[in-house]
Image (cartoon, coloured by chain):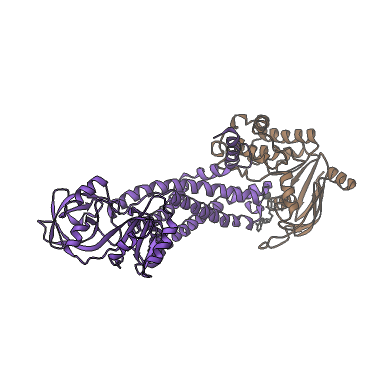
Amino acid sequence: MSPSIARPVLEWFRDLVGAGRPDRGLGLAFVSHNRGRLAAATGGIAMAVLVMFVELGLLQAILGSQSALAGLIDGDLVIMNSARTNLHEWTRIARIRLAEAAAVRGVANAMGVYESGMLLRNPPERRVHRIIAFAMDGQTQPLKVGDPDTVRRALSRPSAVLFDRLSRDIYGPISPGRTIELDGRSFNVAGFARIGPDIVMDGAVVLSDGAWLSADPNAQPVMGVLRLAPGAKLEDVRARLKVAMPPDVAVMTPREIYWREVGFTFRSVPIGIIFGAGVATGAFIGAIICYQILFNEVVDLKKELSTLRAMGFGPGFFRRLILEEAYLLAAGGFLIGLLAALITYRFLAGATGLAMQMHAGAALFVAVATGAMTHLGGLFAARHLGSFEPAELY
Amino acid sequence: MAPASALAREVPVRVRGVSYSYENGPKRVLDNVDLTLRRGEFVVLTGHSGAGKTTLLTLIGAIRSLQDGAINVLGLELGGRGTAAQEEVRRKVGFIFQDHNLFAALTVFRTLWLATGLTEEPPSREAALEEARELLEQLGIGQHLHSLPRQMSTGQKQRVAVARALINAPQLILGDEPTASLDHQSSQMVIGVIRRHLAATGASALVVTHDDRIFGMADRVLRLQDGRLVSDT
Ligand SMILES: Nc1ncnc2c1ncn2[C@@H]1O[C@H](COP(=O)(O)OP(=O)(O)O)[C@@H](O)[C@H]1O
Ligand SMILES: [Mg+2]
């Protein structure tokens, strides 16, 4: 930081903590005086912070995992059935659309992706488990499911599959070299892929489109991934595709699919509402806890606050004092809550297989929410200060 | 308004026809009280317990709102509850409470420094430290500059309360039994400090006490009886 910025920042901070001003910085002294209450207060706020983080983390993980497939698409444009409103629905397009799209000027490559549910048996176990199977061309790889060389080598053999290493462990031990059964056909596990489970699917395998089509010669793809020719403009190609394709084919970029998926998950599944309400509840509980704590503080310090009023300190001083205390409690509670959340995320990630990650945006959101709730609690508590005459301290 | 401010300078306290009753109290605690305090005066207010001394002092100090009559303090006319004049008077008056009313979380110096925040141009921390040290020295508790209330005796806390009232060199000091928990020697010391402050600055003091040894140090002694003021001397 340059000195010219450092100085005002330093002064702002000094002012904030009250160094150098006789009537500032008392919050720290008051708030830390009663250790028991300090612990209870920061603990209470940390709890609210943790609740918000967990709700937010689960929501993000679910939205992220539901849309993860969109992030795997390795292409510029995607054609899909326009009736396919989300990626967990397998409304297909006619396979001929791939050839038609490839013929459009500016399209270098049109690759089919096949997807379906299959029953996996992991001998010697007798039970079968449902798993999602993807199929694609191993040479062009329209989905980035792992190390390109491994994928290419594995998918060059018709009876080989890649097993998603992030799958939930309901399938038993599966590693390269093993033989598994998919819908009764034997496949050799040739390597691992990285796709990741979500709330609908527990695991995934990837096989070659050749193997897929040999089992079902009439199979139709769930999407076509297009790569543009060098120099071709995306919007021009998109416009030409729209003309060339029948109206039941949608043309989108992978990014558009991702956000459409996030929006779809948020709207259609009630999780958006459930977790959103959870976050709001956390913030509300936090505000109430904070109000309770600060209100008790005001009651306990009634005599001292009355003395301060009798000395001539005005409403602004008290509001600042209470808010100073509120912010200190908020900061302490937030840090403890953040730590607790990081630990909880690790635990939840292990338990659910969802990618629980602390995002800067979420941390900022919770920090702002914590500040807001303590601010609110502080303002309400400060209102009680004006309600008695200072002489009542006698 | 030269005459008015000149009057305020010469008569820092003017109480006229003040009566007061508590909501749940049976009778009038104060009944048509008149009182004038002149510049530089040291006046003692006495009377039996429950006579209304604290009530009168808190009315003058603007920490209790007026019901009947008029009070002018340092040129400011006190009115009902929540007026701007109330806050200004509180800032300008050095009030020593019947109980020491210190802040459990704050050291002696932090308390005194905090009080300096009430002035229009607060001194720097260093200047405040110097002033506080000197004042505490005079009051015989110089070693307690950085003590917390729980580390001091009642008498020492009482003297910190006196220092808190004096640190801003107020034009008016109101003391509600400031020597109640002090031995004779310490009482003399505290009253001596207050008197020296008056002599040096021309400020005035109205001090409630039962200690007749202090009566001799006062310019006037007033007695509250049945809610009325009677002059003693
Ligand atoms: N808050 C109150 N509510 C009701 N009565 C009060 C209150 N404060 C004081 N009184 C009564 O008013 C009278 C005068 O009290 P006070 O001014 O404290 O007397 P003093 O200071 O002379 O001992 C006493 O009878 C006391 O009981
Ligand atoms: Mg009294």
Q: Residue B173's spot in the image, x, y percent? A: 74, 42
**Residue at the spot 74% in from the left edge and 40% down from the top edge:** B170
Colour displayed for chain B in the image of the structure: brown
Q: Position of residue B204 (x, y in %)?
A: 78, 41
Residue at x-position 66% and y-position 55%: A389
Q: On the picture, is B33 further left or further right than A275?
A: right
* Nearest the eye: B154 or B40: B40
* Residue at the left extreme of this rendering: A124
Q: Is residue B58 visible?
A: yes
Count of numbered tags: 0
Q: Is residue A129 visible?
A: no
Question: If the image is split into quadrants, where does the N terminus of chain A sit?
Answer: top right
Task: Pick out the residue farthest to the right.
Answer: B3
* Left or right: A199 as drawn, with respect to A11: left
Give A255 or B144, whichever is nearer the viewer. Answer: A255
Percent x, y for residue A81? 34, 67
Closer to us: A282 or B129: A282
On the rendering, which quadrant does ligand 1 occupy? bottom right
Does residue A1 sit above or below A78 in this rendering? above
Image vertical order of residue B136 relative to residue A40, above or below: above
Which one is in front, B53 or A355? A355
Write down the quadrant of residue A234 in the picture.
Answer: bottom left
Image position, residue A52 (x, y; %): 42, 55
Query: Which residue corresponds to the image point at 75% horizontal and 34% vertical from the top-left?
Result: B197
**Quarter residue A281 falls in:** bottom left
Q: Colour of chain A?
A: purple
